[in-house]
Amino acid sequence: MTSVSASSPAPAASAHPLRYRDFRYYILARLFTTLGQFSMMIVIGWQTYSTARLTMGTHAAAAQLGFIGLAQFVPVFLLSPATGWIADHYDRRRIVILAVLLQLLSAAILAWATWEENISLPLLFGVAALLGVARCFSGPAFGSMVPRLVPMEAMPRALAFSSMIWQFGMIIGPALGGYIFAAFAAGPYLLAATLFAIGTAAMTLIPPQPPSEAASVDRRPLRQILEGIAYVRGNRLVLGAITLDLMAVLLAGSTALLPVYARDIFHVGAQGLGELAAAPGIGAAFTALIFGLRPPEHNVGNKMLIGVAFFGAATVVFGLTAFMPSGIARWVAMGALFTCGVADMFSVFVRQTLIQIYTPDEMRGRVASFSLIAISASNELGEAESGFLAALIGPVSAVVAGGLGAIVTVAIWAKLFPEIGRARRFDAVVDDGPATGQEKER
């Protein structure tokens, strides 16, 4: 069952999640940490590509963008199973605070290096890996806190609102990073450090989030990590939702190549890069706002599949803008990226809500860690795949091929995991027995 802190009002099915005090502080922390993260990452990508391009040429520099994604993914892949167990057995709030402080340290290092004009590829790769370590710990703990802060009846709207705030950070963060970097190179990192500090302060106002009693019974890490793997494998709905996102975004992740499009195809510089990077977030935030007011209630599984298919199609259109007249290419690209954000928000919202509802609280950290591996594999490893493929066949071909691959993935997953299409509503409960992914209507 979901527990709500004593400082929150009595649960009510019609209550908006913002009525709950602790959820409001959670949203503030999520907003500021997301702003800090994305204002940094867009500049890290730009500095990596620009630094490598001076000595290696365009194609080799695109490959360095792949290595940046790989540097973030490796820590997530190696550590996430353990950090998921930690999130289930220790105070989740404290874990988030320590992880955000590590991100603050990373921002301070890059601010100093940029100010001293001492940026290098090894330093950028090292800080990217450090940010990957921070995400290993913050992801499972942060993602599994929401069911503790609101009642179950308010959780779909709470997750939609949380996603909207995250997408808002994706919109404003890259734009801030691009604009400020154009005026003051160290500015985005100083801004990120300040935002991480504010996010940490907001998180300290939430009461401690100790492990549930069920999680405290057996504290053998290896056995419980294996139990988490068994749960994900046994719950076909959860497994299908996680792996669908992994494969689709792994193939169609075009964001790693935005510096290439901004610099060498559209010739719009760092400011234009921020605008391109913000376009998917605008579309996603628009969709999340609608879901926050009125979340989808029927045929949710098929809507997730359709969302991923549209994501792939919009990625293809974005890739083909390289062949369009310069007067319209950038605007079509912005529209395609906006559509990517809309479609991605459909699939992300449905996936996150289904996973949260179908997972018992004592296992949410471990399941969230495997979801984080999938998300990181699809994002960071997808960036690596895009960078390496762009170096091999060119950036335009890499983007178009990835979008087509995402569409094919939807068709395959619809056959492999029919449980996704049978997920009709969110108001389902999990059987007390072994997880099977079967739902019972209330």
Image: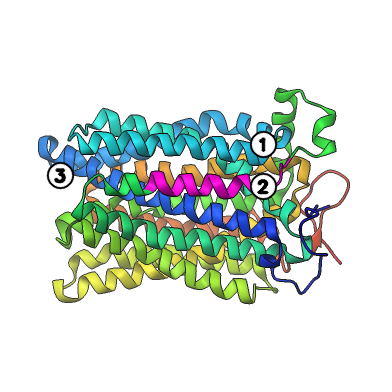
Decide which of tag 3 and tag 1 comes sooner along the chain.
Answer: 3
Q: Amino acid at mark 2?
A: Ser
Q: CA distance from mark 2 to mark 1?
A: 8 Å
Q: CA distance from mark 3 to mark 1?
A: 42 Å
> Which residue position holds label 2?
144
> Which residue position holds label 1?
87
Q: Amino acid at mark 1?
A: Ala
Q: Amino acid at mark 3?
A: Thr
Q: Quadrant of residue 414?
A: bottom right
> Which residue position holds label 3?
58
Instruction: Check disc 1 and report its element: helix, strand or loop.
Output: helix
Q: Position of residue 181 (x, y in %)?
A: 24, 52
Q: Residues within 10 Å of mark 1 (few under 14, many from 20)?
A: many
| Residue toward you, 67 or 214 | 214
Q: Is residue 107 left or right of residue 163?
A: left
Q: Which residues are magenta?
A: 192-209
